[in-house]
Amino acid sequence: MLTIPAKGRSKEGVLEAMRAARDHDIKWEQGRVFGLVYHISDEIDNLLKEAFTMFFAENGLNPTAFPSLRKFETEVVAMTAALLGGDQNVCGNITTGGTESLLMAVKTARDWSRVHRPGIREPEMVLPLTAHPAFDKAAEYFGVRAVHVPVRADFRADVEAMRAAITSNTILMVGSAPSYPHGVIDPIRELAALAQEHGLLFHTDSCVGGYMLPFVRKLGYPVPDFDFSVPGVTSMSADLHKFGYAAKPASVVLYRTPELRRHQMFVYIDWPGGIYPSPTMTGSRAGGPVAAAWALMNYLGEEGYLHITDTVMKTAKYLQEGIKAIPGLTVLSDPEMSVFAIASAKIDVNEVADELELRGWHLDRQHFPACLHMTVNYMHAAVADEFLADLEAAAGVVRKPSLRKTASKFLIMLADFLTHILPEKWVSWLMGKVSSLLGGGGGLPSRLAPIYGLIGTLPNRGDLKELVLDLLDGLTRRAS
């Protein structure tokens, strides 16, 4: 069992150990990952670090103790509201990320319904299948049933299917601008009108696009209505640490009226320690991300964001055209910004991802249908040609028949079959022997393509959920 060291280590020794551990991470500074990290330049990073560390110790839990943080938060929220079509009534808070923003939106809807729809005992929310899983987390946390609705062929929400899913228990409807898997914007105007027609709240999840789509539109690209300019949109979310390029973790959740936001807040008045108010999920609230977001928005200004967006959109369009020119590959639907998915009807895109990882690139794998996620941001402009060259080479490798690829797929299917009829230790031993004979080094194939392809087709989703829970437990419980 790992314990606190009996004696402390030197500062340099600690930092050297951390640098060594980081050497195994993806090289995001080189633009090798499409998602997770949003980087502009070392100059911007230095600004963010300085602003962040200036408020490293401050705690936003008590705005009377730190009025500076109150100023930064209210001004960031006001600037965001104005960017997203809001008026003077639109208000909100900074959260620790998109997940917390979505949790707050669902909690607010639930508590709003307790006042305005008191007869509802089993509240529901209607959302497209492509909506972010944080809504499902919120459903589990707050006792709101998530009703998932299939999307259209272009991966956008199906308005009539959403209409059919509304029941007397529905309190909230959801749309994405854009959805994360495929980067397309749901028909927000039509969905919000539908919600308004039934007296429901409507949330536009613009965690990905909130700080980019307004600038995409100003540059002349077509962007459908999605924000508070749309009647019926009652709340929104936008992530500062995505295309706002601020420091992690930071997002904004917004409400059309202060009255609606009151349902988000928590106050306890009977604690011996005093009155405990909390506007969001967290108690202690880190000051660093709030300060860094304020610093960056004021440093870049609209002119800076327009320049960045122009570069990103040109890079995204260039990459999309390059991808379509590679035999067998395509881009799903017609995404409005720089988030999209690579798919193929002819080759296994999971194997393409494997080949790209061998070349140092990281792309998230998606399913239903199988595709590879691309979030293009500013740092990818410098590596677009290199990526396309490696993608073309990877696709070429996958197109060629390979005995090892066939054997790997066979091993995975064989292991799945044998687990139903043999003890686990026998299966592990037998598969190790077979894999060794095929040059696998004494274990199951290390590549992810056959594994990911298989789990995407498992009929028993409950068993798959348990497997993932086991993996998550192992990753977060034991020190390696």
Image (cartoon, rainbow, N blue to C red):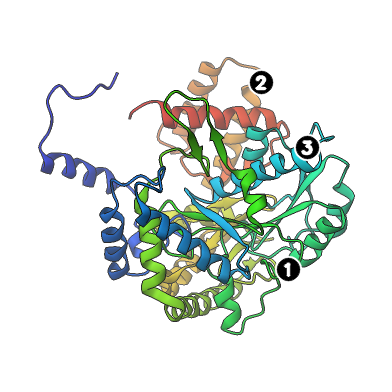
**Quarter location, residue 207:** bottom right
**Quarter location, residue 222:** bottom right
Q: Which mark is on residue 230?
A: 1
Identify the residue at horizontal 58%, vertical 60% (top origin): 399
Task: Between residue 477 and residue 109, name the one nearer to us.
Answer: 109
Given contact means CB atoms under 8 Å apart, are the residues at marks 2 and 3 in contact? Answer: no
Specify whether residue 354 is in view: yes
Specify whether residue 31 is in view: no
Q: Which residue position holds label 3?
A: 123
Q: Local crowd at mark 1 within 10 Å, few (<14), some, or many (≥20)?
A: some
| Rendered view: 424 above or below 239 | above
Kind of residue at badge 1: Val
Q: CA distance from mark 1 to mark 3?
A: 25 Å
- Please identify the quadrant where the C terminus is shown: top left
Pair 2/1: label in front: 1
Identify the residue at horizontal 74%, vertical 64% (top origin): 188
Pair 2/3: label in front: 3
Kind of residue at badge 3: Pro
Kind of residue at badge 2: His
- Please identify the quadrant where the N terminus is shown: top left
The spot of residue 142 in percent (x, y) is 66, 34
Identify the residue at horizontal 62%, vertical 38% (top origin): 137
Given contact means CB atoms under 8 Å apart, are the residues at marks 2 and 1 in contact? Answer: no
Q: Which residue position holds label 2?
A: 420
Q: CA distance from mark 2 to mark 3?
A: 40 Å
Q: Is residue 115 left or right of residue 79?
A: right
Which numbered disc, 1 or 3, marks the residue that appears first in the sequence? 3
Which numbered disc, 2 or 3, marks the residue that appears first in the sequence? 3
Q: Is residue 9 left or right of residue 32?
A: left
